[in-house]
Amino acid sequence: MARVLAALRAAAGAISCLGGIIASVQRVVVLGRGGAGKSTAAVHLEQITGLPVIELDKHFWSSGLHPLSGEEWARVTSDLAARPTWVMDGDLGPYDVLAPRLRRADTVLILDYGLLRCVWRAHRRSRERADFWRWMLTWRRRSRPVLLQAIGEHAPTATCHIINKPKDLTSWFSQLH
């Protein structure tokens, strides 16, 4: 795990030396704690690159906030990931099936913002289920290590960027222009 984290941190530090990045970015996975701004980042990426956004929440949750079964979600995710280009926005925590989209990703963007920022944003935007708040509160300790391991296993050649502050995301976006 330490080796995977070191490799991802090294990749995140390589932001300033990426040349011709728009041509190489075709399939981007955006992950992070709830309230981090994944959807906003995905829309901004769409505006910069022209890649279509696939908002995973819209495919996963029913109108009554009931999740798909694991098998159904794996099938839906595989179908979505088979598309030629995309920005996939979503981190569904314990419900997620990461492998299909990570295997196809050339870029992984992890928004690793602090808990208070994310709680404030999530509280401001909508009402959430209790399991969302449990996931959000434990994301860095429980979900983040699982994400990093999955990236190392299923997306070893993808460029991974771990973003800790909104100003760092702004800087990364400026590299895409």
Image (spheres, rainbow, N blue to C red):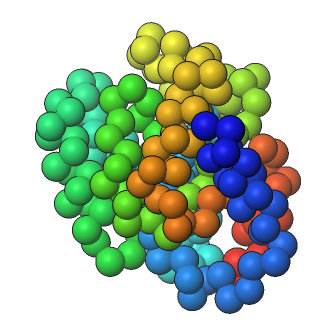
- Seen from the viewer's position, the closer of residues 32 and 154 is 154
Q: Could you say where residue 127 lies in the image, as x and y percent from the top left?
A: 48, 20
> Which residue is painted at 51% across and 20% down in the image?
135
- Seen from the viewer's position, the closer of residues 3 and 58 is 3
Q: Could you say where residue 153 lies in the image, as x and y percent from the top left?
A: 45, 50
> Which residue is painted at 42% across and 54% down in the image?
154
- Seen from the viewer's position, the closer of residues 74 and 175 is 74
Q: Could you say where residue 122 lies in the image, as x and y percent from the top left?
A: 60, 28
> Which residue is painted at 55% across and 22% down in the image?
142
| The C terminus sits in image quarter | bottom right
Question: On screen, 128 above or below 76?
Answer: above
- Seen from the viewer's position, the closer of residues 63 and 80 is 80
- Whether residue 68 is visible, yes or no, is no
Q: In this rendering, would 155 be left or right of 175?
A: left
Question: On screen, 139 above or below 50?
Answer: above
- Whether residue 38 is visible, yes or no, is yes
> Which residue is painted at 31% across and 54% down in the image?
100
Q: In this rendering, would 29 be left or right of 3?
A: left
How many circles with numbers are drawn on the protein?
A: 0
Give the quarter of the image for residue 63. top left
Give the quarter of the image for residue 24. bottom right
Give the quarter of the image for residue 13. bottom right
Q: In this rendering, would 174 be left or right of 81?
A: right
| The N terminus sits in image quarter | top right
Q: Could you say where residue 118 lies in the image, as x and y percent from the top left?
A: 68, 30
Q: In this rendering, would 74 be left or right of 171?
A: left
Question: On screen, 136 above or below 8?
Answer: above
